[in-house]
Image (cartoon, grey):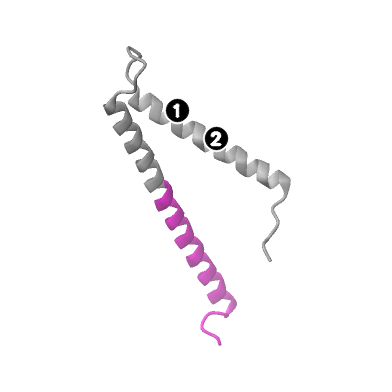
Amino acid sequence: MAAQISDSDKIKQFRELLGTYNKLTETCFLDCVKDFITREVKPEEISCSEYSLQKYLKMTQRISVRFQGYHIQENEALAAKAGLLGQP
């Protein structure tokens, strides 16, 4: 049975997603767009924005892996403290 997510939690998650998206697009835009001479997006702006996005995604993935590893260590330490680790 899947856990139900409340409407307020859904709204909170959506707000966090929008905040992250806005921060990412602003950072990439400020780093990659240098002038407004033409309406066309220059090839260097495209490659810069793609690199910026890839860098952000890799960083987010690394943080997630580290965070998960930290929680696994914490749970193992708590289980060992409670005497539950290694018992059948």
Which quadrant of the figure contains the N terminus?
Answer: bottom right
Image mark for residue 19: 2
Label 1: few (<14), some (14–19) or many (≥20) C-alpha neighbours in 10 Å: few
Q: Is residue 16 left or right of residue 61?
A: right
Span highlighted in magenta in the image: 60-88
Q: Residue at x 55, y 40 (%)?
A: 17
Going by the numbered disc 1, the residue's amino acid type is Glu
Instruction: Name the amino acid, label 2.
Output: Gly
Q: Secondary structure at mark 2?
A: helix
Q: Which mark is residue 26?
A: 1
Name which residue lies at 42% across and 51% down.
61
Q: Please identify the residue farthest to the bottom as the structure is shown.
A: 88
Q: Position of residue 40 (x, y in %)?
A: 34, 19
Main SS type for the magenta part?
Answer: helix
Q: Position of residue 14 (x, y in %)?
A: 61, 41
Q: Is residue 64 magenta?
A: yes
In percent of width and height, residue 38 lies at: 33, 14
- Using a 10 Å C-alpha cutoff, classify the residue at mark 2 as few (fewer than 14 neighbours), some (14 to 19) or many (20 or more): few
